[in-house]
Amino acid sequence: MPDLRKSFLVMVLLGLLAVTACGVGSKPVPTLSHDFTTATPDSNYPTAMPTFTPTPAALGSSENPVVIAMVKDSPSLEQQTALIDLASLLGGHLQMTVIARFYNSYSELEIALQRQQVHFAWLQPVEYLLASQKGLATALLVSNHLGVTGYGVQFLGHSDSDFEIYFNAGTNSSTADARAALGQFSGLRGCLTQKNSLAGYWVPLGYLNLHNIPILESIQTFSYSASIRALYIKGVCSFAATYAISADPRTSSEVITELPDVIEKLPIIWLSPPVIPNLNLSFTPQVDLTMQSRFSDFLRDYARTDAGKAQLSLALNYEVAALEPLPDLAYNPLRELLEASGVRLSDLLTD
């Protein structure tokens, strides 16, 4: 009987040892869950914040001032002060913030226009053609200089030549169109100034090309007075082209002093219309119609006063007698002539 009890105790002890051995290093069996919802991010993940686009400040506010610009690489202190004062005067009258800014080159100004950092700009003809071509500016006002808002070109011939004159000095106008008047220059050589000049080179060439009038390679004289002298002495060129309407270079002191009979010796064969507008004020697409009208009305009224003429002339470094409305289509004749001449507008920049 004692042996049977000992055997039973040994079997129980062996069974306990086996169970203990099986439990060492084992892992608990996971319980299955039927919850398939997405877990909410815990505190280790940033919480997404709502985004919004700020409303830009109104144009003309202190945070978003109206900028009037012009190209001038080294403006004098007087010119800078005059343009800054003009901007301040505009701002005070229109109850908005207006500032002035100079740019060293047209290229710099164009970048500012593209970035919408300029709202009005005083532009020379080539500058305007480039800006308008890219939709960056539209003409608003043009300056009246020496009584006119634009200038043209005149073709001169020598009185010893057999050219027929198509110009009436009494009315200061031509009596025939360009094709009829300039056709007599076919196959001849002209004196032109240089290849960065509108009136002295590309506009005259544009008239000839537009009407299919071939000429020999032109002589570049590099100045209007040199063109006049070369035509006067004969043997260099058969005709010459100069600017006209705003003034006549034949009457300049450097010419008429040395050539007192130049008016008789070098008559005008044909005179163009004023196809080259003067310095203009243009606006950008960010300027609405109301602001355009307010700026235009104030500046035109101010330019009628003696103080306004003086300040505008100083600010623009250009004699201003008045400011007049100017539509973009006023540039179409010039666009056509320059296209016929074959010039690249960028090549006409002087900066």
Image (cartoon, rainbow, N blue to C red):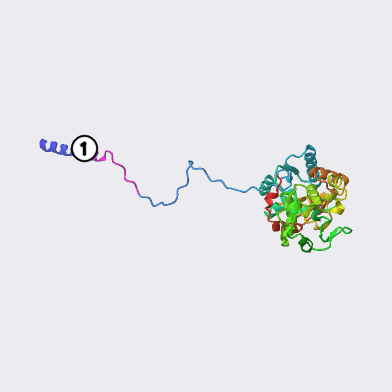
**Residue 63 placed where, x, y %?**
70, 43
Q: Is residue 311 left or right of residue 115?
A: right
Q: In the rendered image, which residue does mark 1 sit on?
A: 17
Q: Quadrant of the N terminus?
A: top left
Image quadrant assignment for residue 153: bottom right
Secondary structure that dominates the magenta span: loop
Q: Secondary structure at mark 1?
A: helix
Q: Number of callouts in the render?
A: 1
Q: Nearer the viewer, residue 47 or 326?
A: 326
Magenta includes 28?
yes
- Is residue 152 found inside the magenta-colored segment of the image? no
User: x and y percent of residue 105 in the render?
Assistant: 70, 44
Q: Quadrant of residue 2?
A: top left
Horizontal relation, residue 166 to residue 286: left or right = right
Q: Looking at the image, can residue 283 be seen?
A: no
Q: Quadrant of the C terminus?
A: top right
Q: Residue at (81%, 53%) from the top-left corner?
A: 244
Residue 333, given in percent of the width and then of the height, sits at 75, 59
Q: Residues within 10 Å of mark 1 (few under 14, many from 20)?
A: few
Which stretch did the figure color magenta? 20-31
* Residue located 74% across and 52% down the image: 201
Q: Is residue 107 left or right of residue 330?
A: left
* 199 vs 180: above or below: above
Q: Is residue 260 visible?
A: yes
Residue 223 drawn above or below residue 154 = above
Q: Who is closer to the viewer here, 280 or 245?
A: 245
| Amino acid marked by disc 1 | Leu
Q: Nearer the viewer, residue 219 or 335?
A: 219
* In the image, residue 340 above or below residue 347: below
Q: Position of residue 103 (x, y in %)?
A: 71, 43
Residue ID at (23%, 38%): 21
